[in-house]
């Protein structure tokens, strides 16, 4: 099995190929309608990594557009930069829309962004919100090729967040009655899926993070070119060498004895954090000595604290350096999420030498396990008891040996960010620009 893998610190990459000496770099704009901050995760972090690689190639002049509090350019190099624009209709202005998944811009068009885009040779959208819609309009008006990169399972997230937003806006009783009675989650999921498919229609290429997304694109857009966009990983940052139990106890307040389990990601229904907490609760009730650290923020943190009391530690979102040390220093990684297009953090845990218990259901991350029980554990059920059962099996075994096997697998299969950029992005970007020039 070939591993496609995720993120580390923003570092300069290995060397990448360059174009002939007299060739001009192609100007690529990537549109991400999410706020950039140093601690942002998800596909914000992915494009940070690719921008770092772009500083080392003469082939590409890359601008990644993010949301920010004011318009601002953050230069990384002469050929790579972040360009921030404030949202026109930010979801941060509407408290009931605060789902914990990151704020976006609901405006249909962004004039400030639109004024910048005609100077580019290629536009790459990553969503169907303000920046994606603006790129679509500019591409159609100016004849600029538009590609799309799918980083999110929009239907699963909409099915989770839609009803919760209504409950926050109208209260649990009325909002819940409407959401359940009218099957609001499914309706919103279908609507968001349709919006994404509409966004893909005029695009000349679609980058996907998993093969099943390519199949969905082909089903709705027969003949649409697709290709796989993997992830790289920094094996020096995410490494068993960072293991430090004394630091772990000092940093998070965990007991010096007992097993430390980690969950990393949004602490809400989209990542099924309550399943992790309730599985730990089952084992605590059976007499196991466990602590759970949740590295992330979200709407379900209070429920998790109520479930586990003093056995849970919630430090919030962590910088990559602290996350790497946490993963290397813990005993088990528990991640029940079923909404992953890629699941970067699962591979980061494996690279850190941490034995992982992962979902084997659709949208889970157990696909990265090469041999169940040897380099990780897959859970086929979705209930807390299913997760508790597999967690208990892991605790009865040699978690350090499983973690070492996971690390070995990553060393053999994980590409660098430079390799992914060179193999998965640059050839397609160059081809799409050449097609326009030939036309």
Image (cartoon, rainbow, N blue to C red):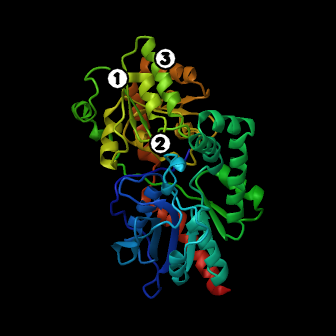
Give coordinates of residue 101: x percent, y percent.
Answer: 51, 48
Residue 176 falls in which quadrant of the image? top right
Q: Nearer the viewer, mark 1 or mark 3?
A: 1
Q: Is residue 364 above or below residue 344?
A: above
User: Does residue 3 appear in the picture of this structure?
Assistant: no
Residue 109 falls in which quadrant of the image? bottom right
Q: Are marks 2 and 1 in contact (CB under 8 Å)?
A: no
Residue density around tag 2, few if under 14, some if 14–19, many if 20 or more, within 10 Å = many
Residue 280 falls in which quadrant of the image? top left
Q: Which residue is mark 2?
A: 266
Q: Which residue is mark 1?
A: 310
Give coordinates of residue 270: x percent, y percent.
Answer: 56, 40
Q: Which residue is mark 3?
A: 282
Q: Quadrant of the N terminus?
A: top right
User: Does residue 20 appear in the picture of this structure?
Assistant: yes
Give coordinates of residue 71: x percent, y percent.
Answer: 41, 72
- Tag 3 secondary structure: helix
Q: Nearer the viewer, residue 119 or 2?
A: 119
Give coordinates of residue 289: x percent, y percent.
Answer: 36, 17
Q: Nearer the viewer, residue 65 or 299?
A: 299
Residue at position x 66%, y 48% in the image: 155
Q: Nearer the viewer, residue 308 or 295?
A: 308
Answer with mark 1 or mark 3, whichever residue precedes in sequence.
Answer: 3
Residue at position x 38%, y 58% in the image: 37
- Tag 1 secondary structure: helix
Q: Is residue 187 left or right of residue 176?
A: right
Spatial CA distance of label 2 from label 1 is 20 Å
């Amino acid at each position: 099995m070939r591993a496609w893998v995720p993120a580390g610190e923003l570092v300069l990459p290995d060397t990448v190929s360059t174009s002939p000496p007299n060739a001009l770099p192609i100007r690529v704009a990537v549109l991400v309608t999410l706020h950039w901050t140093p601690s942002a995760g998800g596909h914000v972090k992915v494009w940070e990594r690719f921008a770092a690689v772009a500083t080392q190639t003469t082939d590409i002049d890359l601008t990644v557009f993010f949301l920010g509090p004011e318009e601002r350019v953050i230069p990384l190099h002469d050929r790579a930069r972040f360009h921030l624009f404030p949202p026109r209709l930010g979801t941060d202005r509407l408290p009931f829309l605060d789902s914990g998944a990151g704020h976006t811009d609901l405006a249909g068009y962004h004039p400030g962004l639109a004024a910048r885009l005609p100077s580019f040779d290629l536009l790459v959208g990553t969503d169907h919100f303000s920046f994606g819609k603006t790129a679509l309009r500019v591409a159609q008006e100016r004849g600029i090729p538009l590609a799309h990169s799918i980083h999110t399972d929009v239907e699963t997230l909409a099915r989770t967040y839609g009803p919760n937003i209504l409950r926050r806006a109208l209260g649990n009783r009325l909002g819940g009655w409407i959401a359940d009675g009218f099957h609001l989650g499914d309706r919103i999921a279908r609507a968001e899926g349709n919006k994404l498919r509409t966004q893909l229609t005029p695009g000349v290429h679609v980058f996907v993070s998993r093969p099943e997304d390519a199949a969905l694109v082909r089903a709705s857009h027969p003949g649409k070119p697709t290709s796989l966009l993997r992830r790289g990983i920094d094996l020096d940052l995410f490494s068993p060498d960072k293991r430090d139990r004394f630091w772990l106890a000092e940093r998070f307040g965990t007991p010096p004895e007992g097993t430390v389990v980690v969950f990393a990601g949004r602490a809400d229904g989209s990542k099924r954090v309550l399943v992790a907490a309730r599985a730990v609760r089952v084992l605590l009730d059976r007499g196991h000595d466990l602590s759970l650290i949740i590295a992330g923020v979200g709407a379900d943190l209070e429920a998790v604290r109520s479930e586990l009391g003093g056995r849970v530690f919630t430090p919030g979102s962590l910088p990559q350096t602290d996350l790497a040390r946490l993963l290397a220093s813990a005993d088990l990684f528990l991640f029940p999420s079923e909404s992953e297009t890629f699941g970067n953090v699962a591979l980061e845990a494996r690279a850190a030498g941490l034995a992982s218990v992962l979902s084997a259901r659709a949208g889970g991350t157990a696909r990265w396990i090469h041999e169940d029980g040897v380099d990780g554990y897959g859970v086929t059920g979705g209930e807390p008891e299913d997760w508790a059962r597999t967690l208990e099996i892991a605790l009865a075994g040699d978690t350090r040996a499983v973690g070492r096997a996971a690390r070995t697998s990553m060393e053999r299969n994980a590409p660098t960010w430079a390799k992914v950029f060179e193999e998965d992005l640059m050839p397609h970007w160059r081809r799409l620009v050449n097609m326009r020039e030939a036309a």
